[in-house]
Amino acid sequence: MTRNSPVYGFNQVMLFVVLLFGILYFAKPFLIPVAIAGMMAMLLVPACRRLEHWGLPRGPAAGICVLTALVLLSGVFYVLFYQMMSLGTDIPAIASKLNAMLNNAHQFISEHFQLPIAEQKDYLQRQVAGLSSLAGKFIGDIFRSVLSFLVHLLIVTAYTLLLLIYRGRIKTFVLRLVAQYAGEENTKNAQRVIEKITRVASAYLTGVFSVALIFSVINSVGLIIIGIENALFFGIMVAFINIIPYIGSVAGSSVVVLYTLITRDTLVTPLIVAVFFIVLQQIDSYVLTPKITGGKIQLSALFTIMALLLGSLVWGVAGMILFVPFLGVAKIIFDHVDSLKPYGYLIGVH
């Protein structure tokens, strides 16, 4: 088999793909914080440049940007935590409502399937007993998860700060690699690609978070008007889950509809909530997102969904959020390298 044969080229591509996803999967404890920090650094680059333009040294400018972002995120997490504590007070009422619904279900099954209620309850009690034995482990897992989150937040913060400070050195390193392996004549093209990646990624991420903030307000106000308890919590939660393309909006709104279905004695309120979120999804899909983030990352729906599924498989929730911008960055690179332009055409919309 010669190096110029199509089979040899296909084998090389497949080997690269296998190695790439193998490294992404097995090195995810190291790579996920770096990837999140990279996205955050790209998001903060314009603000950091503005502060540097005003005469602030790069280190203090980066520190101010990271600290401001950390304060804003802490504020969002505080509101969510406070609302979750408030939601916890509704658990007895929710449990009582669920118990009534289970009794109705028992009665329906007994009448239509001739399965005695005693046997149904005995089966459910065995399942609950098995679950209750895991309660201690579950609480321990929550505690460890909180500690892990705080540690990872510290690591991501440090990475973001250092990436902002050393972004010039990293750019020079990439340009020197291009000059060494592709020739000096390609360095200008590489510099344009780097600048476009930074500009597009920053604009896209800014747009995504802007949409999330706008919908946090709209969702919360709408749910308050409808009369949903803990509207602020659900409004913010749905808005930020919506960051995950296609899947997020359906998943987040389904949680709120299910909550109202359990806590209300009528189907009218869940129906109103469902219609409310359907209308908002249409506004998001056809008005807000195209105006704010549209044109930033030109990816086809097919490959966006594939990126979501691959991201979920490799990195879980973090992958579902990060792999779409990664694919957008890959498209920019493909569009500026002649041998890779067919791949850019394949995953794009034009």
Image (cartoon, rainbow, N blue to C red):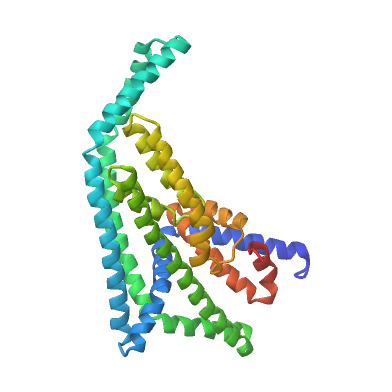
Measured as percent of width and height from the top left, residue 165 is found at 36, 80
Q: What x and y, as percent, mark residue 52?
A: 35, 86
**Residue sitting nearer the eye, 291 or 344:** 291
Q: Residue at x 48, y 46 (%)?
A: 278
Screen quadrant of the C terminus: bottom right
Residue at 22 percent of width and 51 percent of height: 82
Q: Nearer the viewer, residue 275 or 68?
A: 275
Relative placement, left or right, of 123 versus 330 is left
Along the line of sight, which residue is nearer the eye, 344 or 250? 250
Q: Please state the horizontal and vertical placement of residue 115, each as a whole percent of the image.
A: 43, 11
* Residue 220 vertical position relative to residue 190 in the rendered view, above or below: above
Query: Where does the N terminus fall, quadrant-wise?
Result: bottom right
**Residue 248 shows up from this direction:** no
The answer to whether 180 appears left or right of 226 in the picture is right
Instruction: Answer left or right for 38 relative to 230.
Output: right
Question: Quarter-wise, where is residue 117 in the image?
Answer: top left
Q: Nearer the viewer, residue 28 or 227?
A: 227
Quadrant for residue 27, please give it. bottom left
Please say if 282 is above or below 262.
below
Residue located at (31% from left, 81% from top): 61
User: Where is residue 317 drawn, in percent x and y?
Assistant: 43, 52
